Image: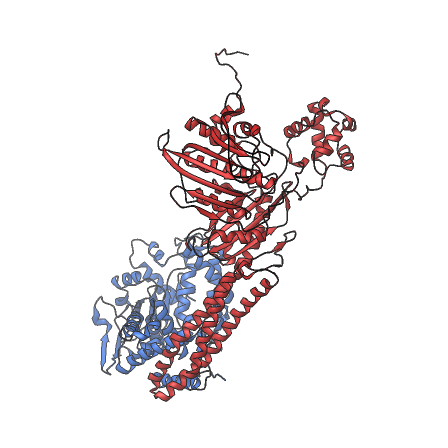
Amino acid sequence: MASVQTNSKITTSSTAEYFAKNLQQVGFSSPTKAVLTTLKESLDNSLDACDMEKILPEISVEIKKLGAGSQKNTDLISIVVEDNGPGIDPDDLATVFGEYLASSKFGRGQCSRGQQGIGISAATTWVQLTNAIGVTVMTKTKRMKKAVSAIVDVDIKKNKGVLRKKETEDWDKESGVRVEFKMDGRIQLNGEAGLITYLEGTTLVNPHLTLNYKLLDEPWVKIERVSQEVPEIPPATNPHPHTMKLGEFITHAHLYGKVSCSKWLKSGFSRVSDQTLQEFVKAGMPKKLLDASVNAMSEADFKAIYQAVQNTELMSPSTRSVLSIGEEALSKSIARLGQVDFFSVITRKPRICDFKPVVVEVALARFLDRGREEEPVQVLRFANRVPLQFDKSACAITQAIESVNWRSYGLNQPKDSVPLGSYVFAVSVVSPFIKFKNASKETIDASDELVEELRRCLMQAGQKLSRHIRREANAEDLERKIRHIEQFGPMLVEGLIRITKANEKRKKLAEEGLRQILGRDAEAAEEKLEESESRLKQLKGKGAGVEAEDVIDVEKVEGGEAPAEEVKADATESNGKASTKKAAGTKKAAGTKKKK
Amino acid sequence: MARAVKIGSGKDLPKLSKEICEIMLRDLEKAQRPVLEAVKCSLDNSFYNPKVGFLTPGDKKVRTELNVSSVQKMARAVFMLEILLRNIETGAVNNKRELYYIAKGVVKSTPHLKPLDFQDQDESDAIIDFICEMFESYREEWNCFANDRGGQTYSQQLVVTETMADGTKAVIDLSTLGTSPFQPKNKPQSLQLKAKKKIDFCLIVESEGTANTFVSNGFTKRNNCILLGAQGVPSNAVRGWCKLIQDQLKIPLYFFGDLDAYTLQNIYRTLKAGSAASLIRNSDFSAPDVKFLGVLPEDVKKYELHDYAVKEQDVAEGRALKKAKDALANDPFFQDKKNKKLADVLNWLLKNKRRCEQQALFMVDPKDPIMPEKIILEKIKKGIYI
């Protein structure tokens, strides 16, 4: 075989070097996206930290332009994020902000926002690459009397964080972190990829968050929390053996070091017990391997075990590890987006999709002050309570929305598209093991099982929504009928009088008779409307103890096979009142007419 | 209790109108819902009576009871009725398009009637049709005429006497018109026919152009006949005209057209037996004696005529096939044993999916321009028709 001699030399790169050259893979593909991703990574970390320590988060965000950026067509942007979290130990600052894959959350099977330990280090890298200065961090934990501030750089060659200008200073906060990124970027406030969309989305799925933000020259905006409960983060769960590929399986084994194979399998995976091990043996796993040390096993041994595991029926993984926002909290939170006309919220029971526990939640809301009838609905996608703002067409959530026939629920929908109207469709997927399509976590992989689960949830929410739309249709029908009576009745009588040449007395008598006939019809229509109103109220009535202003549309779905009974109330009290008033008004009008 | 308004058999429309309006007014005075009844003009209410030879209406009625949903329709019907009665009173005539604009003009001059305004002609047409069905009358009886279309007639023997609206009479000798045709009117009742000399037959040609060709080649000079072009689906004028020829001259009538499902099921059936949509006028607007001269399937074979496959992908042809299939299954005309041979042709067309045009006769002897005439005369003579 011929060999070719070249001068090329095989080299290795550090993780930081790799990401420094490939920042586009983790959300830094453009100056605009860099600003959003930096804000997102920083806010995610703050929220995760608060959740872990059971602190109700109060976070402030300030973004402003400082001048021209070093690159063409960019601005020098300052992004400041300050939280009231537990703070970071000063010794960990360099690791947290300057080292890739340094994470307290990696692969541990919890529903945290961050997972891999890439995002915030990538933000630091971007800051460093575009502005030649690292990120400025101030931190204080409860044990510290004074805060520590420093600049963190990334040593790209060694994948290490480096602290500079470390100082102590007074900070009137009990604990927290303040981080400032000065970097090249461009600011997009509105639209699907806008900062406001991100901040609104984040507040929607974090009802316990109080957020203050100031964007450019706009005044400060404060969005108060609507829930006083910090979400309970369920304990971590071990991976299910059916979710792994052979390579992952072997790597996972070596994390456990010098233990027996049986011990590794039982403690390293969920749903593996002594009895299961016997079934593995029956399925072809050599029995002698059970007591063998993991370190001593060959690749062939692992393959034999892996194949036996795959051929064995196992219980589905536990769903206890998933966290949901909850319908009540989501119902309250959605009102923070604007003036809600009506909405419906569904939280499904945790389900297993592709051997991973998943909770899907959907909030569909019609707004009086956002969106337009002829435009597509605004879709807010969330994965583990983090907004997804890019590459929506490939996302499981978008595909599920497009696959539902929304016309049957009273919405306009072009073929194979999202429906139209002044609605927000917020769809959240929470799972300790969300499968994203890329490292920047912008799109959820559209597996058949997940899309089907999303569809079911959307359809249930759609069914509830359709009740409101039907009621509106009834109200419109009533109005139309009243209009008909008022418009055409007298004209019919006039025409008959002219043709028959009847006198004025007969005209009045006929008009009175006509009102009686058509009044009865209008009353029948009103009764129909009132009937649908009362049915809705009846459903609301079941949610005892809920304040009228806070009335929510809550439905707990068990198993989620079929639309479940509504157990709490509906969110459209304000709209409902308006409709009732309208109906009462028309009835009164009809009544007055009868007396004439 | 509401009472349905019954229409009398007499056709003094102004008097009937007043009676109906009076009943409606009385119902209203008593806070009862007036009900208007109209003949249901649809296939499911059509019956073929082989004795009379055309489609007749069954007992089904469309009842319109006054309620919030129908109040607009009723108000509009009374509004349009007033306009039509005025036309009868003054002797003015209009077509549907003109009535649409007249209604618009009334609304313009009477602003409080604005809600009755018709947004497009379809709306006013539907109200006019409703009035006609309610009174079981022709729209011509309301002085509402369709545009004259089709039926251009040629003859050297026919004389038509038309009674004008003012009672005067006009006599038209068709032999004096040269190559110009006589255009039959939508109101056949005002025409009186006379033959100067014995007329042997009347030939109705589906294609207006082919009828013209026959005349130019001397068909009417060589034959004592009436020749007319139907111009596709026969209009009311053509249907009424053929009925008049049949009844007043008592001569055989032959239809000559394409061999395809559309011609047989739409054009010929409508000419011979009327249509479901015009049940109330079929008695005066169909010519049950007309025979289907061809093109027949056997002609295709005998004269080796060029035919071609029906393109099922073609929207119009596909629809014609589907309609033909429906006709065989549901149309009482094709289901009656009297018309079995016609149904057989329709079945043949559906089975073979071939079609042959009337002009194919010109290929039999390309050098002889009157060969189609010869074939037609031969078919008449030998009785090769259905």
Chain red in the figure, letter: A
* Quarter of the figure with the C terminus of chain A: bottom left
Q: Is residue B276 above or below residue A497?
A: above
Residue B198 horizontal/vertical position (percent): 30, 75
Question: Looking at the image, which is closer to me, A132 or B224?
Answer: A132
Residue occupying image coordinates x 40% and y 70% = B272
Instruction: Give the x, y percent position of residue B141.
Output: 33, 79
Res. B374 image quadrant: bottom left
In front here: B322 or A107?
A: A107
Q: Percent from the top left, x then y, of residue B199?
A: 31, 73
Visible in this render: residue A373? Answer: yes
Q: Is residue A283 above or below residue A553?
A: above
Q: Is A103 drawn above or below residue B332 in the view shown?
A: above
Q: Quadrant of residue A567?
A: bottom right
Tell me: A137 left or right of A286. left
- The answer to whether B286 appears left or right of A154 in the picture is left
Specify the quadrant of the image occupied by residue B92. Answer: bottom left
As drawn, is B385 to the left or to the right of B152? right
Q: Nearer the viewer, residue B2 or A429?
A: A429
Give the image location of residue A83, x and y in percent. Answer: 52, 40
Q: Colour of chain B?
A: blue
Inspect this view and state whether residue B274 appears.
Answer: no
Which is nearer the eye, A434 or B223? A434
Q: What colouring method underlies this structural image?
A: by chain
Quarter containing the N terminus of chain A: top right
